Structures are given as C-alpha cells and as structure tokens.
Amino acid sequence: MIGIEFYTNGHIVSEADSMRQKLGDLAKQYYATSAIIITDAGISELGYVDIARKSLEKAGANVVVFDSVVADPPIEVVEEAIELARANQCDLVIGLGGGSSIDTAKIVALYPNEFESVNELLEADISGFKKMPLFAIPTTAGTGAEATFVSVITAKDGSKKAIYTPKILPDVAILDATLTLKLPRHITAATALDAMVHCIEAYTSRTKKNPISDALAVKGLQMLWSNFDKVLNHGDDIDARTEMLLGSTLAGIAFVNASVAAVHGLSYPLSINFHVPHGHANALVMCGVFNFNLPVAAPLYAELARAVMPIETSGMNDLEAANQFINQLRDFLKTSGLKYRLNELDITEQDIPALADIVINTYARLIETNPMNMSLEEVKMIYKEIL
C-alpha cells in the first residue's frame, strides 16, 4: 500500500437552509468582525447574498460583498477581490457560488501575507503563509471546490494556473441544498456528471489511489447516480438535491487526495479554447477516455458498476460490467439535454491537433495519473470519436 497523507475540511454542515440558520453562529466561532462574501452577479440577483449578509450581521459582523467573479476567474478579478478584503480589514472570507467563486475566495484568504500580485503568489512558496478563516458555500452540486485545496484561475495569456496546497482548504463547508433548487436543468446535469467523473477518476487513479478516497468515491458516486434522474426531472426534490450536494462534496474530498486524470486533461482545452463549461467538457470526453482505459481499468470500473447498478450487472464478468457502466454514463449524458458531440459546439476536425497538443504538453500530469498512458495520436483518436 502507498503511504497516505489525507486532508479534508475541519467542519462540514449538510442541512437544508443551513446558510440562513447557521452561518452567523459559525462566523462567531471564528471571532469574525468583518466578512467578505466572494460571489458572482447571478448569485446576488437570486437573493442568496442577502440571506448570508443578514445571518452574518445578526451575529455582529460587518459585511462587504465582491460579486464580480466570472467563470474561469482571471487574475485581475482575483486581485480586485483581494484589494477589497484588504481595504476592509476582513477577518473572514466566504466563497458563495460555484467553483469559480470558491476558488477566488481561496486566494483572497491569503491576503494578509505580503505579495503585490497573484502572479507573484503563483511563484511563491506559500507553505508558511497565514490564511484567513475560509468558509465555502456551494450553489452547485458538482465542482467539490468546497472540499478541495486547489484553486484554478486564468492567466493573462488564457492558460489555467493552479495553486495546489492544503493551506487553502476551506475551514468550513456549508452544504445547503436550498441554494441548488433554482439551478437550470443543463447546469444541474453538467455539474452532476462532473462530480461523477471526480469519483471515477479518484477511484481509478494510477498514482494516488488510496482506501480513504476509494470509500468516499464509492459512496459519493452512489448518491450522485441514484439521484441524477430525480434532480433532472424533479428539481424541487430537496432530499435528492441534498444527497447530490453531499455526494459532490465526497467526490471533492476523494479526488483532491487521489487526483483526477485524463478526462480532465482532455476537457481543459475544450474549456480554454472553446469556452465549454468545465462540467460539460468532462461529460463530453468521459466515455471516450473510459473506453480507452478498459484494457487495464475494467476491473475497477466493474467494481463501481456493481456498487451503483448491482441488479443490472449481476452475473456479468468484469469487462461486461465495465461496459454496462460506461454505457449508462453515456445514456446519462444523452438524456441530460446537453450537447454530446464536438461538432455541435462548433469544434471541427481541424481543431483536434491543437487540442491534443495542449493535452500532451500542458496537462501531462493528468495523463500520468490515468490508468493507461496516452500518446498524442491516442488523444486525437478520442477526440475524433466524439466529433
């Protein structure tokens, strides 16, 4: 067995309406006097920021709001949020929203340290840095950002840059499924499939697979799998939404400790070059990658299949069960309403060489954790299969 170092949040609350009822009391436990809420304009418009503000102010904290986060947050936006936190001497940082808002909040939480720009921070050894108390409140069931110690932002040249250290792990994750009730169907589907990929890639990680992540990945996948159709067709089902949100968090804890792999490696260029949302990009390439991995990963996919669809896989050998598993994931994508061919997103065969080159030259670390090695030509093949 490999050596294991495992990190997760110190405090997780999973309860409907918990942001309204418990955020202020949790802030008191950290002696917060001035809190900054990091979010986006859409979340503000839904009224969620007002709910958080009232809970914090009732507990005696001043509140400032930064609601200019955008998808794949640029460094410049992150720096604006840092300046606002510094100017107001904030002593609590709250990321409220999707992965972009929470990733921004993770970097803002480092603001008491001396650095002039986020570019400088990306180059620094932050192992000895202080961090402000950091709360994460997700409004989607997918990214798992509330339980991870990675923050991904966008550099000026359009490339994705990551800060990856347990130093930025949120202290508190508040899982309030009422905040996911208004999610449109396509976002519900994309984020759920994203979380499933997190579970699957954590469970099959070639380099960092471990028993703790395995257990969380299996349970997370069971919760996501069994509630996927429910939340798509009955979006107001609060019990199903609660299970999806907790499943996503379990997936986040699993993958940040075990790593993701080639699905993410092939999805990132789709997001960078063609602005395909991250969860949708993962869903597009997942079955192609899993099929490619079958020669070595079929036993592991079979284990997951038997955990989530025991009746359907009864009596099947590993390869049969693994294929059944992948076929069901493909059906999830097709019935979700999401586009599932690259040409539907204006991606052509002429674009594939450049996409594959990015995978091999920029995201080689994600190929290293994949169950199978993958060459440039094999990456092109996988893209062409979903063209």
Image: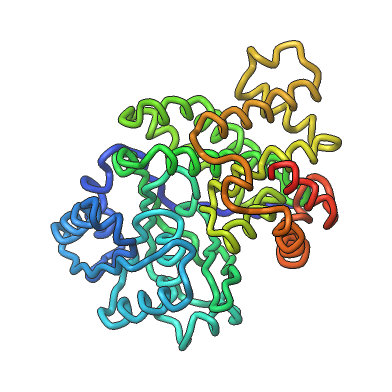
- Could you tell whether 383 is left or right of 78 in the image? right
Q: Is residue 235 visible?
A: yes
Q: Nearer the viewer, residue 166 or 75?
A: 75
- Could you tell whether 285 is left or right of 53 in the image? right
Indicate the position of residue 239 as horizontal and vertical percent values: 35, 28
Total of numbered circles in the picture?
Answer: 0
Quadrant of the rendered image containing residue 99: bottom left
Colouring scheme applied when the structure was drawn: rainbow
Q: Nearer the viewer, residue 45 or 28?
A: 45
Quadrant of the rendered image containing residue 366: bottom right
Image height of 26 relative to 305, above or below: below
Image height of 361 relative to 245, above or below: below
Residue at 67%, 25% in the rendered image: 305
Residue at 74%, 26% in the rendered image: 323
The quadrant of the picture occupied by the C terminus is: top right
Quadrant of the rendered image containing residue 273: bottom right
Indicate the position of residue 260 as horizontal and vertical percent values: 66, 50
Indicate the position of residue 282 as horizontal and vertical percent values: 60, 47
Image height of 7 relative to 299, above or below: below
- Could you tell whether 232 is left or right of 126 in the image? left
The quadrant of the picture occupied by the N terminus is: top right
Indicate the position of residue 75 as horizontal and vertical percent values: 48, 76
Residue at 29%, 69% in the rendered image: 66
Q: Is residue 364 visible?
A: no
- Could you tell whether 58 is left or right of 348 in the image? left
Residue at 31%, 38% in the rendered image: 181
Image height of 286 relative to 351, above or below: above
